[in-house]
């Protein structure tokens, strides 16, 4: 099974859209993307 290729802009857009959803734990979302809260 090949690796899934993604573009950085796509990852940023997914992060931004998920962060706008109601009830999302921002700390956990940042951890899932491997970034700090400050960066998020």
Image (cartoon, grey):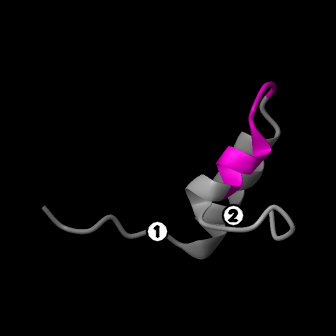
Residue that appears at 32% across and 64% down: 4
Furthest toward the right, the residue is: 38
Left or right placement of residue 36 versus residue 34 in this view: right
Q: Residues within 10 Å of mark 2 (few under 14, many from 20)?
A: few
Q: Nearer the viewer, residue 11 or 36?
A: 36
SS for dot 1: loop
The image quadrant that residue 20 belongs to is top right
SS for dot 2: helix
Query: Can residue 40 be seen?
Result: yes
The image quadrant that residue 5 belongs to is bottom left
Residue 15 is situated, as x and y percent measured from the top left of the image, at 69, 53
The C terminus appears in which quarter of the rendering? bottom right
Q: Nearer the viewer, residue 22 or 38?
A: 38
The disc, 2 or 1, on the residue closer to the chain's N-terminal end is 1
| Mark 2 lies on residue | 12
Left or right placement of residue 38 versus residue 17 in this view: right
| Mark 1 lies on residue | 6
Residue 34 is situated, as x and y percent measured from the top left of the image, at 60, 66
Q: Nearer the viewer, residue 30 or 16?
A: 30
Magenta residues (range): 22-30
Residue 33 is situated, as x and y percent measured from the top left of the image, at 60, 60
Residue that appears at 26% across and 68% down: 3
Residue that appears at 69% across and 63% down: 12
Residue that appears at 68% across and 68% down: 35
In the displayed structure, 39 sits above or below 37; it is: below
């Amino acid at each position: 099974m090949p690796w899934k290729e993604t573009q950085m802009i796509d990852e940023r857009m997914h992060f931004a859209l998920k962060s706008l959803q109601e009830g999302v734990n921002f700390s956990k979302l940042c951890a899932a993307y491997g970034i700090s809260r400050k960066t998020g």
